[in-house]
Image: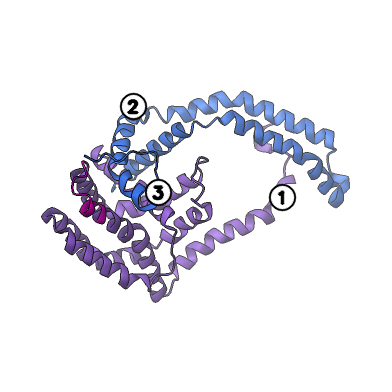
Chain colours: A blue, B purple
Amino acid sequence: MNNPENERTLLNLYVTLINAIEQVNSSIAFSEFFNYLFSMLPALSRIFAGNQAENIPSFNELNERVRQYISETIRDMPSRLLKIVDNYRELLPKLPDFTKLYFEAHNIIAPVIAESTNLFLHTKPSMQ
Amino acid sequence: MRLEQGLFGEGTLSFIIPLVGPVIGRVIGDVISAYFLKPQDSEKRFNAIVLNFVLDPLYEIIEYIKQNPNYSGKEELKLMVKIWIEEHESYMEILPKIASIIASFSYKLSYIKNEELDLIPRAVSLPRPILSKYVQGIKDLYHEVVNKIDEDDLDHLIEELAKHIKERYDNSDIQFSKAVRRLISSEGIKLVFVARKMGLN
């Protein structure tokens, strides 16, 4: 691939396909992240309090700032997502062709890999 | 509150710096160490790359074609190998990226170890001048692969590949598990094939 743009397109298509296969539910990951963050707050405030007690915002203050940050992030999210999705405008029409060719290629090579490594066992070798 | 201010206000995230430092240090260290590999070490690294991601899967594919003469996808498989060999430079470039993508994929077979996937980008990222130098040395084999596939001379090709594998095996520095090297290489082979078909090469 002499053109980096082609490589980028190919790998973006690949990632998009992988994500489609995986059916990632990003909302789960998103809420998990914030759950994790909230659970960290008491620990963080303890660390701060131990080192520089006079400069440290209280737990409630921190909590309030996190909530504010989350609400701004969520409010800002649609426009940021639109910007990202807009970059896929050129890419998405190619996705069906890519997917078809990818699985054609997969069906050709998968029997070899399945036989030698037991990978891709879900693929039925198309032997005559 | 502006988002740019950060979660805890200005300056309060400085406790992260000691954590970030080692990560950046490791990345810089990897890059520098790749550039300053001693000649014998870079040859070992190149042998490892070729052995794990070219010769091993190639041997398996040719052996499979030989053992299964009635395989319905035989001609397409041969075409796929030819495209792969012709596009070997693109293939080498996308391998580390494929490993990173698959490492981030949450649905994985249990015997695909993330530690190995993480190692691939570092193992495969030989500096381009060094890579080009060693690739010159294997181009004859690549030509031979394409010719022998065209002539359907698979017996001699298998012998030739076995010889190259044996020669490089003791003089290589990293061995990946069968599952990882075949998974990553088969994804790379598929992608260069699809790229050619879509005119993205």
Quadrant assignment for the N terminus of chain B = top right
Q: Are marks 1 and 3 on the same chain?
A: no
Q: Residue at x 41, y 34 (%)?
A: A17
Badge 3: how crowded within 10 Å, few (<14), some, or many (20+)? some
Can residue B128 be seen here? The reply is no
Residue bounds of the magenta highlight? B63-72
Which residue is the site of mark 3? A118
Query: Residue B22 sits in which quadrant?
Result: bottom right
Q: In the rendering, which numbered label is found on residue A93? A: 2
Amino acid type of disc 2?
Pro
Q: Left of B137 or right of it: where is B183? A: right
**Is residue A117 depicted above or below A19 in this figure?**
below
On the image, the x and y values in percent for residue A79 come to 54, 24
Q: CA distance from mark 1 to mark 3?
A: 48 Å
Callout 2: chain: A
Q: Position of residue B38 (x, y in %)?
A: 42, 75
Q: Which residue is mark 1?
A: B14
In three-dimensional space, the C-alpha distance between marks 2 and 1, rounded to whole angstroms, equals 44 Å
Q: In the rendered view of the protein, which quadrant contains the C terminus of chain B?
A: top left
Mark 2 vs mark 1: in front? 2
B92 lies left or right of A35: left
Q: Residue at x 20, y 47 (%)?
A: B79
Which mark is first along the chain, 2 or 3? 2
For this rendering, which residue is in front, B158 or A64?
Answer: B158
Q: Secondary structure at mark 2?
A: helix
- Which amino acid lies under the numbered mark 1 shown in the image of this protein? Ser
Q: Residues within 10 Å of mark 2 (few under 14, many from 20)?
A: few
Spatial CA distance of label 3 from label 2 is 34 Å
Number of numbered discs on residues: 3
Q: Quadrant of residue B88?
A: bottom left
Residue A72's spot in the image, x, y percent? 66, 27
